[in-house]
Amino acid sequence: MLLLVMAACVAPESNLSANNPPVVDDPADGADTAGDDGADTGGADTGGADDTSADTGAPSEYVYDEDEDLGNLLSVADVERALRAGVTTVLHDMDPFLVLEAFDVARSAEDAYCPYHYEDYEELYGYDYWYGGCSTADGTSFAGTIYGINYAPFWSSYYYYPAYGWWYGTATVDRADGQSMDFSGSWSMYRYEYGTSAYVAVSAYGDSRWQGAQYGGTWLAEESSLSYAVSGGSAPNVGAYISVDGGVSGLTGTANSVWFDSVFMASAGQGSSCPDEPSGTISIRDAAGDWYDVVFHGPAYAGASSFPATCDGCGEVWYEGRELGEACVDLSSLTTWTGSPW
């Protein structure tokens, strides 16, 4: 009788072995139907089936395939030359303030009846608001709707503004002399001076085209589109700093587009611990539509440290996740301008 009682107290061996642990219901999965084979069909968890689905041999879209044919890529030397030319074009040659001047010239042929002005805006708010769809007596036509102002040089307290203006909207002016200007987007910019220091800020998003001899030799005659914000300052014997976000497309040369991503550069006199190298990324796009990113490691703002503190003026060249080498470009012109970068 004692032997029978002892035998009844022994637990079944099959449900307690290390290879077959007891099933515990997961509240998130609902009822667990796992049996001895370990397959879990409850909820969103499919157990071992998920482990094999990702292992198909196909490369991830985020991982570069070493065996892929890269085609006719630019060399690092090509990227260096294109980057240098692109920065010079965008931040030195393409003066955005020319838009304010050219637009004033374009609309100087208006008369008392065309284009139509909202007089209240100028009286109440201090800027001009007009819409076209008309022709002047001498044959100049206006179309579109636009508002803004281009101030003449003026003083404000201790600050002198040699240039200050903004225009928003879309407009076309076809002048009687055969020249014309198309304007669209939002353009706001100023330059001011305080003592011997000069400051500049530009927000330019849109297209402006001039057809005719007067601005035929400038960037306004090209098919360029601006989409950037630039600010900076300079002082004699101190140097300059500049901050750029955005870029320009429709350029000529190897790089038809140049894009700046959080780019900042400053001279030692403006507080940079690494005056020979900017921070941020400058990208160029070639004629085939391929983008090349050059990543620099200078300080992100005046007084900031550089990580890593290479300060050699070189940046890593990347193409679709693959590092191609280092591009070393002299960008000292970004920290030596006075008055304005352009």
Image (cartoon, rainbow, N blue to C red):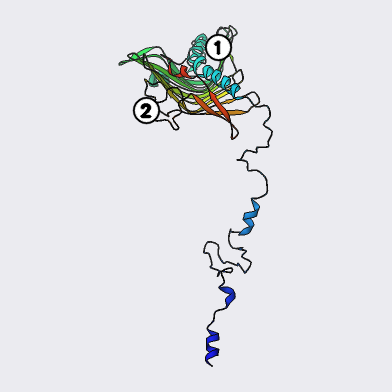
Query: 114 or 202: which is nearer to us?
Result: 202
Query: 323 or 195: which is nearer to us?
Result: 323
| Residue 283 picture location, percent across and down | 55, 27
Does 321 sit above or below residue 115?
below
Kindly check if marks 2 and 1 are in contact, taking CB atoms under 8 A apart as contact: no
Q: Which sits earlier in the primary sequence, circle 2 or circle 1?
A: 1
Which of the 4 image quadrants contains residue 34? bottom right
**Given the image, on which type of amino acid does mark 1 rest?**
Thr
How many marks on residues?
A: 2
Local crowd size for mark 1, using a 10 Å CA cut-off: few (<14), some (14–19), many (≥20): some
Query: Which residue position is annotated with label 2?
Result: 303
Q: Residue at x 68, y 29 (%)?
A: 71
Q: Is residue 119 visible?
A: no
Q: Residue at x 55, y 85 (%)?
A: 7
Which of the 4 image quadrants contains residue 200? top left
Query: Which residue position is annotated with label 1?
Result: 218
Q: Is residue 20 visible?
A: yes
**Given the image, on which type of amino acid does mark 2 rest?**
Gly
| Residue 143 picture location, percent across and down | 56, 18
Q: Residue at x 57, y 19 (%)?
A: 81
Local crowd size for mark 2, using a 10 Å CA cut-off: few (<14), some (14–19), many (≥20): some
Q: Which disc number belongs to residue 260?
A: none
Q: Residue at x 52, y 86 (%)?
A: 6
Which of the 4 image quadrants contains residue 80? top right
Q: Quadrant of the N terminus?
A: bottom right
Furthest-left residue in view?
A: 157
Query: 276 or 93: which is nearer to us?
Result: 276
Q: From mark 2 to mark 1, how far is it between C-alphas?
A: 37 Å
